[in-house]
Amino acid sequence: MNKRTRGFELISENQFEKDFQDIDINYSELKLPKRATARAAGYDIYSTIDFKLEPGEDIKLPTGFKAYMLEDESLELYPRSSMGFKYYIRIANTIGLGDSDYYNCESNEGHYFIKLRNEGSKIWEVKKGDAIAQGVFRKYLLSDNDDFIGEERVGGFGSTNK
């Protein structure tokens, strides 16, 4: 039997119904992140909608996926290099950081959303299915004097300090 170490899954159809209420997409159209080349570090993340992003605007997009990984790993989300270079598109929180305990959290199953911002001077047009970001799994280290004592994650994005 293969032990799962890290990967992507679609959110459940119930979570899809909650998070995609106002979006014209079928559950069967969701795509899991995928590497574009044999040596790519990042897994391309695809847009679930068509949109245009004017300079100065931002958009929050549900992705339809969740990620599982080992306890000492994280999933880092970055804009695709070409987006930043050609259009000055960035992820609103500069780098998205998904912790291993975000997977299947109580409030939203660990569903990843991406908020993109157009800091450039040109309109950025995206079609459903275009790669808009990339995710990279990373190991992280703890300090010698790490003495964390706390609670398990219950909430979703931004909930760990509440």
Image (tube, rainbow, N blue to C red):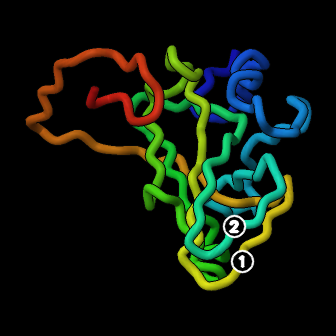
Residue 93 place in picture, x, y as percent: 44, 55
Residue at image position (62%, 25%) is 4
Residue 6 is labelled as: none
Q: Which residue has dot 2 on it? A: 53
Which of these two is toward me, 71 or 155? 155
Position of the N terminus by quadrant: top right
Residue 106 place in picture, x, y as percent: 51, 14
Q: Note whether 57 is above or below 4 in the view shown.
A: below
Crowd tier of the residue under label 2, counting other residues whose Cα lies within 10 Å: few below 14, some 14–19, many 20 or above: some
Q: Amino acid at mark 2?
A: Leu
Q: Are marks 2 and 1 in contact (CB under 8 Å)?
A: yes
Which of these two is toward me, 6 or 2? 6
Mark 2 element type: strand
Residue 123 is labelled as: 1
| Residue 108 relative to residue 37: left or right | left
The disc, 2 or 1, on the residue closer to the chain's N-terminal end is 2
Q: Note whether 111 is above or below 105 in the view shown.
A: below
Quarter of the view holding residue 82: bottom right
| Residue 71 relative to residue 59: left or right | left
Residue at image position (62%, 21%) is 3
Residue 116 place in picture, x, y as percent: 59, 59
Mark 1 element type: loop
Residue at image position (59%, 60%) is 58
